[in-house]
Each structure stands twice: as structure tokens, then as C-alpha cells.
Amino acid sequence: MAAPTKTEEHGAAHGDAGGANHPPSTTGLSNEKVAMWAFLGSECLLFGALISVYLLYKGQDPEGAITPHDVYDIPFTSVSTFVLLMSSLTMVLALAAIQRGEHRRCRVWLLTTAALGATFVGGQAYEFTVFIQEGVTLSSSLFGSSFYALTGFHGVHVTLGVLMLLSLYSLSMKGKLPKERAESVELVGLYWHFVDIVWIVLFTLVYLIK
Amino acid sequence: MTTVDHKKIGIMYSVTAFIFFIIGGVEALMLRVQLGTPDSTFLSAEAYNQIFTMHGTTMIFLVVMPLSAGLANYLLPLMVGARDVAFPRLNAFGFWVFLAGGLFMYSSFFLGGAPNGGWFGYAPLSRLTPGHNMDYWVFGLQILGIASLTGAINLIVTVINLRAPGMTLFRMPIFVWMSLVAQFLLLFALPVITVALFLLMFDRQFGANFFNAQAGADPLLWQHLFWLFGHPEVYILILPAMGVVSEILPVFSRKPLFGYQVMVISGIAIGFIGWGVWAHHMFATGIGPVATSAFSASTMFIAVPTGVKIFNWLSTMWKGKIRATSPMLFAVGFVTMFTIGGLSGVTHAIVPHDTQQTDTYYIVAHFHYVLFGGSIFGLFGGIYYWWPKFTGKLLSETLGKWQFWLMLAGFNLTFGPFHILGLQGMPRRVYTYPDGMGWNFWNMAATVGSFMIALAVLVFMVNVWKARKSPLVPEDPWDSRTLEWSIPSPPPEYNFAKIPVVTARDDWWHQKYEEDENGRAVRRKEMAPDVVALLGRRSSAVAVADGPPPPGGEGAGDEATTGTGSGEGDDTGDHTGDHTGDHTEHIHMPSPSYWPLVSSLGLPVLSYGLIYQYLPVSVLGGLWILGSLYAWALEPSTAPEEPEPELSSSTELAPVSQGTD
């Protein structure tokens, strides 16, 4: 089954027929995939709690305080949202490439995804800087605290995702990411899509709804 | 230090938890000495605050949870017929993080004072307490949360994915079920307290406003977040003990568990309803009549599945041939004490009653009856029951019974009077009380009782000490029902020489027994050859079977392969000759690793840096964690993985050939 490619030497060392790295599991899914789903389930509650806090404190600031809509730059954030959503597309393309055994193309898409993610984080950093200059800080008001906590947590998640993507890229460069281990890309993809979906919710709740 | 064997890790969890149990117990004794007499000056108010905070935190996060985790770690793979947990190195990581978190929190005693805001850390109070005391609590719990989260994911995947052929969900032992529900609760409850702790950390370290009432913050936010975690946590603590008891009662009543499916479903129901009752901790906070009514109703509702369980336990014993062994005594003790605790719990669901009794010793009585009379009794029962599986030796029945009766008497003498004191209005969390309140007698009684409990724990330690020299017993000394008793004690590193095929619930029992025409269980005359071999074999073989597999990558692989190749047929893995087994099943156990230990140490470093706001140390801790996770992920014995800890340990169970093929 394992079609020989130039990154095959590692796969061959591990190569049982079919390239599955797992004993047959009860569910037919790999342990890693079940673990990733469990982890993402846990993450839902993490963001759920943060979103609840944000919504609880939305509009609770005393008179005269800076409101969220004084500081948001919706067009700017819309662009970075678009960038992040596009990265989900490139993530899918990276997975499709490695599943076909096209390692060079996979690397290109991995790097593109990481770059789009980094762009998003960069945009967020810029946005935070602007907001802080306008007087919204972690300690300035309830809005400040809950806004930075919520979007900051998401930003950290994106950053971790970028690190994972870069790790995959470097593994692939070293020839340690054979077609048989396409699931590694799939798992990072699951995480990446989750982070994207969370951002859709956050963007809607935090920026768009008045 | 480098082991990744789930059984060793399970033992390490349990031993560490027991040491913390002693520490938490000593703290409890100090509290009781202080409160034994009015106007006592044994402890200062500040010392009392620190000790009662650490007593609660220790008993919940460092004793009951890890003790349950230890049992689950040891037993779950055995009970579902798996070679190991899904992520062995992640498992080791979880243990080391737990230990690091515990030591980190206790280091506060030497670094300026222990946490002093109660185990519930109510903000805004905990936001404002000066000093670093509460910082240790915040960061310590975060670290422990990471340990629990990795453990939960690992055990969930193990149970979901690594069951032996034929081990359907409704054939799983009930302990597996209850642990699974508890792990799911952990999985979903931990992020909530993680958020709460992060917010508190932002407030304390960076001046955020989440709990800052002056900025308009909601003073109840902490309580909502905390109890949305804290109430499921109650079931995280009790469900594994319920599972233990549900294993013990059938074995020593010589009857199958009554209403197995109802037991499973009620366990799941408790898991779900446990989420809908958090605000019953907040009846006295003015959350309004609608909320109190709703939560009062949901709280009474959760008593239904709990009551179902109690009646099922009783029905299991009904007309059974009861053997009053130590595990059985503890299990029965669990049922009775937990029932008392449950009943006082129902009284708390009644809002007018609760508003009277909350923050008095009545509530202290309630949760000690469920947590001590429940969890601790159940877990002690489990320790007595599975001790021969862990060590190949039995604990002394005489000493076990002494421990049980002393503990039962001491427990009731300690916490029974708390009901009365509570009804008399003695508030909790006060470090002393004046003479003439009418509280003196029962406080003294409780203090005497607490020392009886301490004596009972001493008896247990003597028992363990003496059991070192007792003779080996057969692998199935209780004539039990579940799979873990079908293999030698203590089990070899690879657990099952041949993965069992399960055909029924209580499969091991059915291999030994069949029903005669009157429906009575009789020994099977025609048992499968391997069962005969096992039943006839004494544990002298255990030492041999346990010997071979040394920890070490290639070595372990070679040994295990030879073991299966030659000995699979007779299921012992140590004989030669008999080539009846097929040769497809190669056992490759994961190799030991330093990285789980190394990476876990980065967390306290990071936390110290953040507490003292000393950036270089935080950065060092962060890089330490990242670097060691990368080293871990790229460790040569396994295939490379992602840096994310949840992913980074690959299935080392893979039946892939590593040079021996």
C-alpha cells in the first residue's frame, strides 16, 4: 500500500502493511483522534465560560466609560477574520495534499496556513495596541478585562496552532511526515478548524452584535 | 522515575495521595484540637485559616481525586482487557504534574504562608487578600487541573478505544462505567474552574476587574463559575467510590449486581443532572425566588438516581450469601454513611432549611458524611479488595476489621455531633468560640472522635506494614467476577499475555460458573483449558511471570515477543514449549521516558515566576515546558508527534515491528 515517495524511509522503518500505526481500536478511530475530540469538547466549555463572562459584563460599565463600539474597527477586524477563515481552506488543502502523498504541496499549504494564522495574530496585536492607546486596558474597566481575556485566550490558541503547523512543516522537511502519518495533519486541522469556528462566534458576539 | 506502566503510575498516584491524606488528616486533627475547647489558643486565627483552607484543598484535590485516579489508572485497562492506557507517557506526565502541583502548593508554608481563603476561594475576598497565599492556591489548582485534564482524556480514550473484543459498553464492569462518567465530568468541569482561576489570576497579578466590585463587577460571578465546576466535582469525587462499592457488594454477596443497566443509567443521569444544581450552593446569596425554586427542584431530582443506586445496592445484598470481609464492611459502611449524608443533602435542597443551616456545622456534617463516609470508606474498601491484585498478598482481615469499626465509630462520633452543633447555630470557618454557648460538649466529643479516626488510619498503616511478609495468595482470592482477576497478581507489565475475548458481562465469573437447573451457580465442570490452568495455579508462578519484561525499548520488545511466542498457549507467558498460540500478537510495551517528569517541572517554575512577577523565571519556565514537550514528542522510541501535549504521546501499543520482525 505504501507508495514509495522520497520521504518514505521513515515510513518504511515503521512500515507494517497499510501503514496504520494503531492496533485495531474498539471504535475504529485512532486514540489520537478520540483524544483530540475529547480535548476540543473540553475547550468548548473553556470558551463557553469566557463568553458567559463577557456577555455578563457587556454594557455593565458605569456611565461615561468607553463602550466597545467606540473602539472597534469593524472593517479591519473583518479583514483579519476573512484571513483566518481562509486559513481553514488552506488547512484542508494541506491535508488533501498529504493524503495524496504530495509532500511538497502539503508543505506549501501548511506554511500558507501558518502565515495566515500569524497574520491574524499580528492583526490582533495591532488592534490591542490601538485599543490600549485609546484607553481600554485590562484594568481600565469591566469591558477591558473581559474583552482582553476572551479574545486574548483565542489569540493564544491561534498562536499554539501556528506553532503546531510549523512543527508539522519542519517534520515534513526532515522527511518525518510520511503519507501514513497524514493523521497528524488531520489532528492539527481539527484543532485549527475548532479555533476558527470559535472565532466566528466571538466575532459575531463581540464585534457585530450591538 | 521514568516508568510509563499504568499500574506503577496507579500505585504512585495512590501512595502519593495517601501521604497527602496523612497530611490533610494531621491538619484536621489540629483544627479539632483548636475547636475541642472554647477560647482555645492552640492556633491563631491566621494559622487556623491557612490550615482549614489547606485541609479542604488537600482532601479534595490531593487525596480523593488522585486516589480515585490511582485506582482507575491501575484497574481500568485491566478491567476492559487492554494492555495499557491509550497514552502511557501522557499518563506519567499527569502523575508528575499532580505531584508538582501538590508540592508547589505546600511549598507556600515555607514561603510566606499557605492559602487562607477556604478551599472555595470566594472572590471578591480572595481577590483582596494580601500576600501571596492565595496566589499559591490559584496556581497550584491550575497545575493540578492540567494533571486531571490529561488523566481524564487518557482514561476516556482508553475506555472508549481499547476495550477487548466483545467488551461492549454494557458488559463493562460498573467501576469502569462510573469512572468513565467521572472522567467526562472532569473533562467538562475543569475548563470552567480554569477560567475562574485565570480571571482571579488576572485580577490579582495584572489588576483586571473581573471581581472588582468598585468597577461594577458581579460579586456572584466567582460563585457561579466555581460551583459550576464545584458541583460536578462532588460527583467526580463520589462516582468512582460508588463504582468501587458496586464491584465489592456483588462479589461478597455472591450475586450479580442488581439492576446493572439501571445502575449505569443512574450514574449517567447523575453526571448530567450534576450540572444543573450548582446554584444550590448559593441559596443564601440572594439569587432570587425563581432561581432558588428551580435549583431546589433540580437538587431534589438528583436524589432520585442516587436513591436508585442505594436501593440497587440493598437489593444486591438481599438474600445473598454475604461474606463479611473487610472490603465488604467498608462497602456496607459506604452505603449507610452515604445514605445519611444524602438525606442531610436533601434537607439542604429545601430552601428555608438551607438558609438556616448554611455556613453552620450542619453543612460540614453533610459533606463529611458524603465525602468521608462516602468516598473515603468506598476507596478504603477498594484498597482492601484489590490489594491482593496489587501485591499478590492479602491485608490482614483482623486488622482490617479493627480499622473499619474504629473508623466507623470515630467517624460518627466526629461528624454526627456536627449536625447538632449546626442546628444549635455554631458557624463554620470560625477559629474559636466563647464558653457558654452550649457547644462545648459536642465539640469535645467530635475531637475525641477525630483521634479515633486517626487511630484507625494508624491501624491501616500497621496492616500494610505487616502485609509485606504475608504469604502469596492465588490470583483470584475473593472468587471475583471481573477480568482483572483472570491474570496473575501482580499483573505482568503487559497485563494480558493474550487479549481476552469477552462474551458476557462478568465474563470471568461465567468462565468459572454455570447455572444448574435450579438457577444456582455451580462450578463449571468443563472449563476452558486456560481457566483450569489458572485456577489450579498458585501464585508461586507469579514471581516468574512478573520477572521478564525489563523496562527498556528494544529489550522490552524482545522479551515480550519471546514471551508471547512461546507461552501464549497456556496464558502464563513464562513457560516454554507449548506453541499453540498464534504468532500474530506481538507485545510491544512503551519504553520509559524522562520527558514527562522533566516537562512537568516547568509548570511550578513558570508559576513561581508569575507569582513573584519576575519575568526571567516565567520565561524560563515557559521555555522549559515548550522545549521538553518538543523533546518528548521527538523522542526516538516512538514516531514524531505534534507539540500539543494531548497529542504528543503516540500509541506505543502499536503492533508494529521495531526490528524484531
Image (cartoon, coloured by chain):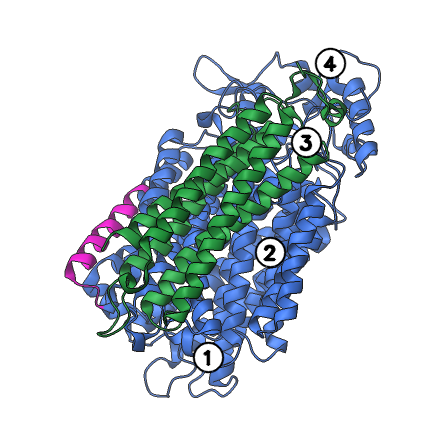
Which amino acid type is marked by label 2?
Phe
Which residue is denoted by mark 4 in the rendering? B581
Q: Which residues are magenta?
A: B286-305
Q: How many residues crowd around disc 1 within 10 Å: few (fewer than 14), some, or many (20 or more)?
A: many
Q: Is residue A69 above or below residue B562?
A: below
| Among the two numbered marks 1 and 3 on one chain, the one whose residue lies closer to the N terminus | 1
Q: Residue at x 54, y 70 (%)?
A: B136
Apparent side of residue B628 relative to residue B112 in the rendered image (left or right): right
Give coordinates of residue A121: x percent, y percent. Answer: 48, 52
Q: Which residue is mark 2?
A: B98
Give the secondary structure at mark 4.
loop
**The disc labelled 1 sits on which kind of residue?**
Gly
Q: Residues within 10 Å of mark 4 (few under 14, many from 20)?
A: some
Question: Marks 2 and 3, Cα distance to the nearest angstrom?
Answer: 25 Å
Instruction: Look at the picture and state if A6 lies above or below B354.
Output: above
The residue at which mark 3 appears reads as B495
Does the CB distance between marks 4 and 2 fall below 8 Å?
A: no
**Chain A shade in the render:** green
